[in-house]
Amino acid sequence: MTRHLQQGFALLLSCSLLLVGPGTRFGYAAATNNSPPAPQATQDSPEQLEQLVAPIALYPDSLIAQILPAATYPEQVVDAEKWMTQNGNLTGDNLAKAVDSQPWDVSVKALTEFPAVLGNMNQNLAWTSELGDAYLNQQPELSQAIQTMRVRAKQAGNLNTTAQQKVSAKGPTIVIQPAENNLVYVPQYDPWLVYGEPLAMFPGWYPWPGLFFDGPGVEFGVAFGVGLFGGFGWGWHNWGYDWHHDGRVVYNHNSYLSHSTTIVNRNSFHSARGNFNGESGHQAFRAAAGSPDRAGMHSGAFSGFNQGGIARGNASRGQASFGGFHGGVGFHGGGGGFHGGGGRR
């Protein structure tokens, strides 16, 4: 009798394990499969990137190669612009030597050759910071956006070879280079009109003197002589843009590496791409009160400065531009070297 009871108990226990065990294991597996995925970096859409690059897409390739890395150092852009204003008496070799001794990144030093470009980046710091963020985190997509905008400008009749620049096609890639070896013209244009159909203005973006042409075409001012800075490692001829390898900036014959501690390279958290050396966790530029990031965007290192006149939070996009100065804010003086003149096309 005892033996029969023991056998019956064993059978009952086995049945219980069959009923409970699979359900328990299934429940655990379901919980595992339903666990939230690892957070991924929010990225700009192609349309947002096109809007972002619109102010520089028609610049010579080597100038873009300087602007994009410098945009990852917005705090140095501020310092450099302030220093340039305070040392406006320096020119030529004296200026180059003084710049060379500064602690800035080589890309920021290079832009002292183009004071209007540096001034524009300082004035539009929200745009500058987002451009640097996109350069670090969406390099191939950013390069594609530049090419897309060049195609649109060419179709609109606003991108052609002139006495100031050479425009050529290498396969599907449009390349822009100075017409002369040691003279660089920076085109003046309305970035919201020059590409044909009017483009929504980047929020809070304001023009800088010498870089803006109030109309649908393109003009050129005076040339910048870059030969004076040729003896320094950060000079013009050390920069290039490699369109065929995800659009990498080339500095001194090598891929440029940004060591910025301001703009975070979020790709380092999610992939093995090693094109950059940005250090995470050192977000020196904090969001100012009342300056939210653009809706749906990353939590970027910069979200609002009030330096140089303009630095807006990117809470929204979509202000259509149909000419003029888009908001009634006039030029902010300085900028150096650009005085109209070259032919409109």
Image (cartoon, helix red, strand yellow):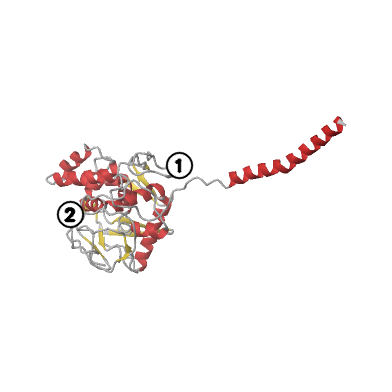
> Which residue does the numbered mark 2 point to in the structure image?
337
Residue 61 in percent (x, y) is at: 33, 53
For disc 1, the neighbor class at 10 Å (few under 14, some 14 to 19, many from 20) is few
Q: Nearer the viewer, residue 263 or 32?
A: 32
| Callout 2 amino acid | Gly
Q: CA distance from mark 2 to mark 1?
A: 43 Å
Choose mark 2 or mark 1, whichever is in front: 1
Vertical relation: 329 (above or below) 37: below
Residue 246 in percent (x, y) is at: 43, 50
> Which residue does the numbered mark 1 point to in the structure image?
269
Of mark 2 and mark 1, the one earlier in the sequence is 1
Q: Is residue 14 left or right of residue 329?
A: right
In what quadrant of the picture does the N terminus appear? Answer: top right
Residue 237 in sight from this viewpoint: yes
Residue 163 in sight from this viewpoint: no
Residue 152 in percent (x, y) is at: 37, 65
Q: Nearer the viewer, residue 141 or 45?
A: 45
| Callout 1 amino acid | Phe
For disc 2, the neighbor class at 10 Å (few under 14, some 14 to 19, many from 20) is some
